[in-house]
Amino acid sequence: MARTARALREDATRLRESGWTFGAIAKDWATRHGLNPRVAMRLAHGLTQAEVASRWNDLWPDPVPKTAKHISYWEIWPEAGGRAPSLDTLNRLALIYQCSAGDLLGGEDHTYLDSAASAALAPPSTPRGAGGSVQLLTVAIAVVRDGRQLLLVCRRDEAGGSWQFPAGVVKPGADPAAVAVAETLAETGVHCRVTKHLGRRLHPVTQVICEYFLCDYLTGTPDNGDPVENLTVTWVDDSKLTKFIPAEAIFAPVFDLLTEEM
């Protein structure tokens, strides 16, 4: 679904308040909305092409000032009619957008496959093990859907129970995507396959690294395979998701993906 510039600005404001970097927002939009990474980065800042050109001219005065058309040419590339930005151009845009030049080129991101990458998200208070290495708990979360139905488990807790997506701890060296699939089967009896990595965050409450994966249902009838940890397992219509999990508790890319498709 196409998003208006206004809707994207509102989305960016909400994500920034949640602690997202401009780079993370742009990558998320490039994936979910099909935006060119340079367009996504500009919109993440809430800027127009003319405003970017104005900032450029303030930083690097030139007898021939940059205009919105220059910015447009760089954003259109590599499509027909665009112009490839030079390394110097990318470096200058990166300064304006407060990101790395590489963020403006796009491409697939498989960082989540590197088990050491999540260490970069560790909070200052994270305990350290022998040799000073950061000891982080990483959890793989499976957002499994069958049409408009989403698979949820009800965890046992002090309040009696809380609804969540199937999840499992990722041991060092393990593939988070494989863990998401295996734990879903173990907990619910449902076979699924990962179709998309939805992102990663440091959970604001539990302070663990959460890796989110969109999964398609393959086969199996939901059954509580872990009665010690869970009360029950069920399918829920996506339109009723927030009756089970509060909207503010749902990872923003997951919430946006599901609500856009309603």
Image (cartoon, rainbow, N blue to C red):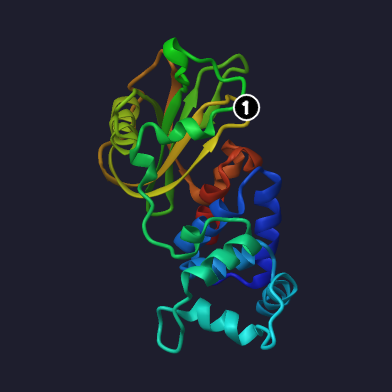
Q: Is residue 80 above or below residue 188?
A: below
Which residue is at 52% across, 26% downward?
A: 208
State the SS at label 1. loop
User: Residue at the front extreme?
Assistant: 63
Q: Which residue is the site of mark 1?
A: 205
Q: Position of residue 233 (x, y in %)?
A: 41, 30
Residue sitting at x 47%, y 21%: 134
At horizontal 58% and vertical 84% (from top left) the residue drawn is 70
Q: Looking at the rendering, which quadrant does residue 241 occupy?
A: top right
Residue occupying image coordinates x 46% and y 23%: 137
Comparing 210 with 81, the one in front is: 81
22 versus 188 height, above or below: below
Residue 122 rendering spot, x and y as whole percentages:
54, 28
Q: Is residue 11 visible?
A: yes
Up-down: is 18 above or below 12?
A: above
In this view, the residue in front, 71 or 210, is 71
Using the image as rendered, state which of residue 68 and residue 179 is in the foreground: 68
Q: Is residue 165 visible?
A: no
Badge count:
1
Q: Amino acid at mark 1?
A: Val
Q: Within the image, what quadrant is residue 138 found in?
A: top left
Crowding at dot 1, Cα within 10 Å, few <14 / some 14-19 / many 20+, comes out as few
Residue 100 coordinates in the image, percent (x, y): 53, 56
Determine the residue located farthest toward the top in the rendered image: 130
Q: Position of residue 141 (x, y in %)?
A: 42, 35
Q: Is residue 68 left or right of residue 87?
A: right
Q: Is 202 located above or below residue 42 in the figure?
A: above
